[in-house]
Image (tube, rainbow, N blue to C red):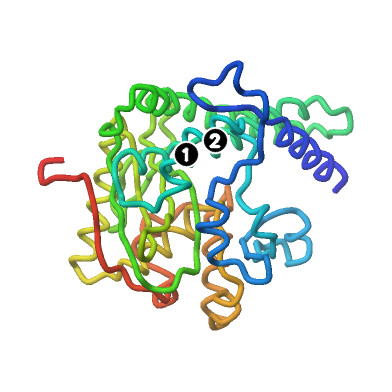
Amino acid sequence: MKIAADFFNEMKRNESRGRCLHFERGERCNEIISAHSIQKSNQLGEIAEAGHVYRITAEMSVLRDNNWQPAPQKIGWKKASTFSGFCKYHDNELFKPIDNYPLEPNSEQVALYAYRCMCREYFTKENVATSLKNFINNSALHAEQKNFLEASYMGHSLGFQRLQYHKKYFDAALLSKSYSEFQFLTLTSNSPWHLQLSGVLYPDFDFLGGGLQDLGDFKSPLDFITFFTAPLAQGWSFTLCWHASSNNSCVALARSLASAVSCGASPQDALLRFSFSCCENHAFRITWWDSLPVLAREAILSRVALMADPEAPVPSDYLAKGLEGIAGWEVENIFTTLTATS
């Protein structure tokens, strides 16, 4: 147990070593801040109760107290979703069109939300890979523990290399203001807002259970998608966004959602299922969770545990079924850059 505690301390040390991930970082990056990957006032503040939100976590202290299963944890809304991945100057300047204005949506705004999603994952993956590399030679490790950490380091290093590949595309597009290189699908709602999130995914299966790409293919770049919630002038939104370099799998994923809905599937069920299957960077309203039936809460926690288990095979239909009737919101409108020939 001490080894685990030491490793998490190493993780925290690396997380505290902030750096600016902006595509024009340089001399002006003299004040690294704790940036929010989910907007503080316009999003987290909307669902906070008594200054707190819930998030489902698999941190060591939570696992130890919950029979080694993920569980919701109360966290202060001002601390939720933060990462030290931007300097004050670039965070304020770059994200002004989304932090100061509601989502319309337009291509620039969506590209900026997507960039923030990607940078948060980049920051996290780099920290994990660095922590593992630094910890592998810890003299207190047994041979079995060292072998496990070496294998984990290889996996996280590969994940970080994949993110470096995609960050180059994102950086180049934003530097040249080529926002049209990003495609998106946005679903909007006027229902009460309970869930906020920001995440990324290498899509493996679609909303119909069809295969998209082999995540075990280490020879070719994997297609990459971002997703996020965002405030509108009236209501809120859930967006899937990707760079055109990932069109192959991401267009198919977005179209499968439309196909599933046209065949009678509930879009709100699909979004909730996607959220708890694919995103650890989330926050939700405490009273919403507490008001859910016990079976609904158990179903969500079981899904999170399944998708977080590195040894459990991923069901091909994990986006096609499960967690029905829990969402409690309605989708009213859809906006997309996709065309009939996309």
**Residues marked 1 and 2 touching at CB (< 8 Å):** yes
Q: Residue 243 at x, y = what percent?
A: 32, 34
State the separation of the CA atoms marked 1 and 2: 6 Å
Q: Which mark is residue 105?
A: none
Q: Residue 123 versus residue 30: which sits nearer the camera?
A: 30
Residue on which the image places disc 1: 95
Q: Residue 103 versus residue 219: which sits nearer the camera?
A: 103
Q: Determine the secondary structure under disc 2.
A: helix
**In this rendering, would 112 be left or right of 78?**
left
Q: Residue 129 at x, y = what percent?
A: 65, 30
**In this rendering, would 150 be left or right of 310?**
right
Q: Residue 203 at x, y = what percent?
A: 38, 44
Residue type highlighted by circle 2: Asp
Residue at screen point 54% across, 83% down: 293
Callout 1: few (<14), some (14-19), or many (20+) C-alpha neighbours within 10 Å? Answer: some
- Residue 11: name its quadrant: top right
Residue at screen point 35% across, 65% down: 234
The number of numbered discs placed on residues in the rendered structure image is 2
Q: Determine the secondary structure under disc 1.
A: loop
Q: Residue 290 at x, y = what percent?
A: 60, 78
Q: Residue 194 versus residue 107: which sits nearer the camera?
A: 107
Residue at screen point 80% across, 44% down: 4
Looking at the picture, does residue 133 appear above or below residue 250?
above
Quarter of the image that includes the C terminus: top left
Residue on which the image places disc 2: 91
Callout 2: few (<14), some (14-19), or many (20+) C-alpha neighbours within 10 Å? Answer: many
Residue at screen point 68% across, 64% down: 73
Residue type highlighted by circle 1: Phe
